[in-house]
Amino acid sequence: MAYLFPGKFRNKYLDVIAPEISKTKALIIDLRCYPSDFMVFTVGRLLLPDAKPFVKFTAGSVKHPGVFSFTPNLTLGEKNPDYYKGKVVILVNERTLSQSEYTAMAFSQAPDVTIVGSTTAGADGNVSMITLPGNIRTAISGIGVFYPDGRETQQVGIIPNIEIRPTIRGIIEGRDEVLEKALEIIR
């Protein structure tokens, strides 16, 4: 089994760790953090046998305020007979937000993936800065983020296949019940 923690992962490590991951029967990707590098297309291409659509966006019209249109689907992966064939378990929770959610969304398109944990923050998409009168700065997402079938992710989050949350007893005992569930699934 391999365990990947995106909070410490860098794309430059991939050439070294990919051959080691490929030898395993299961991969846990712990997205209960914010990735330290944008890994959607680097790690993602290892997980899929073919290109597959994983997201589409809505964008506003400058010419027609209030009008939003869907962009074409964005795909992940390419023809890859050497893709990772083991089981993939992705761990998420309410701290999984923005780029972490986008990463979970992308990786969920790979074969034999199970997302475990609790619903994510529902806060993916780009950040558009706005300066208000009095030099007050705020930010919003300037685009909508959707699965190719049109399901929303913003304000909804990534919904796990198997929902599990830490319990008071588990916290007292110092256990990671979400990780324990992932290991149970792998076994």
Image (cartoon, rainbow, N blue to C red):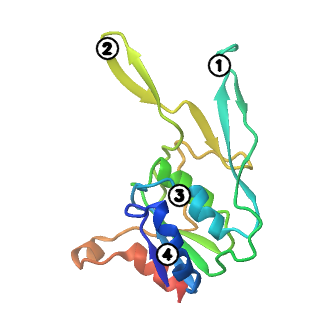
Q: Which mark is residue 66?
A: 1
Callout 2: few (<14), some (14-19), or many (20+) C-alpha neighbours within 10 Å? few
Q: Position of residue 65 (x, y in %)?
A: 65, 15
What is the distance, in whole Å, between disc 2 and disc 1 at their CAs?
25 Å
Q: Is residue 112 above or below residue 132?
A: below
Q: Are marks 2 and 1 in contact (CB under 8 Å)?
A: no
Secondary structure beneath dot 4 equals: helix
- Residue 103: x %, y % from top left: 54, 56
Q: Would you say 46 lies left or right of 2 here? A: right
Near mark 3 (Cα within 10 A), the count class, few <14, some 14-19 or many ≥20, is some
Q: Amino acid at mark 3?
A: Met
Label 3: which residue?
39
N-terminal of the two: label 2 or label 3? 3
Nearest the viewer among 84 and 11 is: 11
Residue type, label 1: Gly
Q: How many marks?
A: 4
State which tag comes first along the sequence, 1 or 4.
Answer: 4
First of labels 2, 1 by sequence position: 1
Is 157 on the left-hand or right-hand side of 178?
Answer: right
State the separation of the CA atoms marked 1 and 4.
46 Å
Frontmost residue, 147 versus 3: 3
Q: Which residue is mark 4?
A: 17
Relative to 111, 186 lies left or right: left
Circle 2 residue: 135
Q: Residue at x 57, y 64 (%)?
A: 43
